[in-house]
Amino acid sequence: EFRRVLFRSVGKSILESVKATRNVCEHNTNLGIILLLAPLTAVPTDVSLPEGIEAVLSGLTRDDAEHTYEAIRLAQPRGLGTADSADVTASSPDGTLAEVMSQAADRDAVARQYASNFKTVLHDAVAILNASSRFKEDWEQAIIYLQLKLIARDGDTDIARKCNSIDAHESKRRAMSVLRAGWPMTMEGRSRIREFDFPPRRAPGASPVPALTSRNACKVYMFGFPHSLVLIVFVCVQ
């Protein structure tokens, strides 16, 4: 579907890509990736992504927002809820796709990219990967390192939305702990990343210990299905 993005709107590409996903999978597996890829693939091939993304975003229309709202409702992401502004459960958007994404930027990391010319993806995260000596030797480890860095810096809006703010804060704290312990070069760092993946165990009758209330929260985002932002960054540096 993205091969056709230069011949149709970003919003229409998002909607058709979600429809194509639903034809083969009943679950929401690609929405974040689709929302990030569609504007990037609309940048002309003779222009670099950092140079061309602003023009793409400024050219987004209300029709793009309409198609994207329809796509999000079709994908049915978990933890969507409602909002005072830019509520996709509403009948129609109140602005262009860039405008409604900007209204949601404080609560959603993907929407924040539309409001910042993809700063996290095209500048911050790409710089982290390019500076990593491990990327060429072990790209999987470099991707996990990037995910840790982003969670430690910004938190994870997916975890906050699908679980709660306590879990999001705990995942941020654990990411910081892993990095400070020197992962992946130290035994302590490798031990702490295992703790990041699994909530602490406790003996029967022992006092409660801080743990993610959703056991899969970190496991899914860290190792099972890397966050959409991280996957897109990996594509951008290839």
Image (spheres, grey):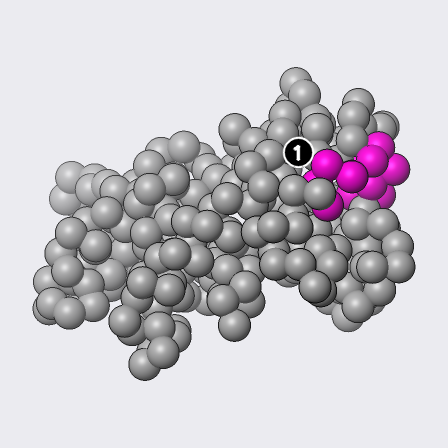
Q: Classify 105 as above or below 6.
A: above
In magenta segment, residue 208? no
Instruction: Determine the residue positioned at 50% across, 60% down.
Output: 233
Q: Is residue 4 above or below residue 60?
A: below
Residue 115 visible in the snapshot? yes
Front-lying residue, 214 or 130: 130
Identified at 23% across, 47% down, the residue is: 176
Quadrant into which the N terminus falls: bottom right
Magenta residue span: 56-68
Q: Furthest residue to the left?
A: 187
Which residue position is annotated with label 1?
A: 101
Amino acid found under the numbered disc labelled 1: Met
Q: Is residue 178 left or right of residue 140?
A: left
Which quadrant would residue 49 be assigned to in this image? bottom right
**x, y percent for residue 180:** 15, 52
Looking at the picture, how far across and down is residue 21, in whole percent? 76, 64
Identify which residue, 118 or 87, lies in the foreground: 118
Residue 52: percent from left, percent from top: 66, 50
Residue at 41% from the left image edge and 32% from the top image edge: 165
